[in-house]
Image (cartoon, rainbow, N blue to C red):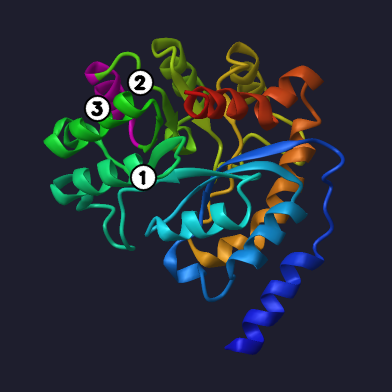
Amino acid sequence: MKIWMATLIAGFLAVPSLAADRVLIDGHVHYSHDAWEMLPPKAAIKVLREAGLKKVFVSSSSDEGTQMLYRQAPDIIVPVLRPYRKRGELSTWFRDETVDDMIADRLSKNTYAGIGEFHIFGADTDLPVVRNIVKLANTHKVFLHAHSDSDAVDRIFAQDPEARVLWAHSGFVAPQAIAEMLAKHKNLWSDLAFRSEQSDDGKVPEPWRKVFTDFPDRFVIGTDTYTPERWYYLVDHANWSRQWLNDLPNELADKIAFKNAETLMNWALNK
């Protein structure tokens, strides 16, 4: 196992970087407890720098993973607070009343730009635990990183019209449906983590080009290292993102690549 880990880590660092081609901020990275032994904090930060990432929005289960990376490299890590203490809480956290106390306590002690990524769908968004999370985000002026359907996003904004929401994976819906949501909610951003349809052999298909053009200030890129093995993909994903971004006008490409994430980050951290 140790030999496999060493080989895997060496593989991460051997992948060539195209960092000089375009600055990137990755808006969706996890460093959860099952990744810590395979990829210790120093090695993880080296991977992020090898990818040429200016900043990285990091959350983890538990939050200690995020804190380890932040202590190692506060210049690159943007901490985001997950309501999960360990894997397996995706479908239970919103009924666990101890979550609110945990989130409130950590928000009072540490620096965060957001709460999430959390999974919530439909009417469960109106449960007391989730309502309290939305209130905490407002109180502490942090965004909500929601892995949600459109109904849940609507419900969050019904609770707090001034909330800032980063919609994980752009809801896994088609570009037109994304556009409808962005038109409805002025404070909704969409991350592109685990989406590949926006690139067809390095070219941006017309439906995606249209939604990017119509909402140039609302998209951010992301990788989503939801399993430890996804860290192996991080450098390749950064370079793949640069490839399709190069098919867009330069100003638009820069907004999606890093400026939109920077706007969201600065709103939360410059309190």
Is residue 244 shown to the viewer in this render?
Answer: yes
Kind of residue sitting beneath label 1:
Lys
Kind of residue sitting beneath label 3:
Lys
Crowd band around label 2 with a 10 angstrom C-alpha radius: few (<14), some (14–19), many (20+): many
- Per the rendering, the mark at residue 109 is 1
Task: Pick the quarter of the image with the N terminus.
Answer: bottom right
**Is residue 267 shown above or below 53?**
above
Q: Closer to us: mark 1 or mark 3? A: 1
Q: Count every numbered label the image shows and give the total.
A: 3
Quarter of the image holding residue 217? top right
- Per the rendering, the mark at residue 163 is 2
Kind of residue sitting beneath label 2:
Ala
Q: Which residue is mark 3?
A: 135
If you read the primary sequence from the N terminus, does the residue marked by circle 1 or circle 3 appear first? 1
- What element does badge 1 sit on? helix
Quarter of the image holding residue 75? top right
**Is residue 203 shown above or below 48?**
above
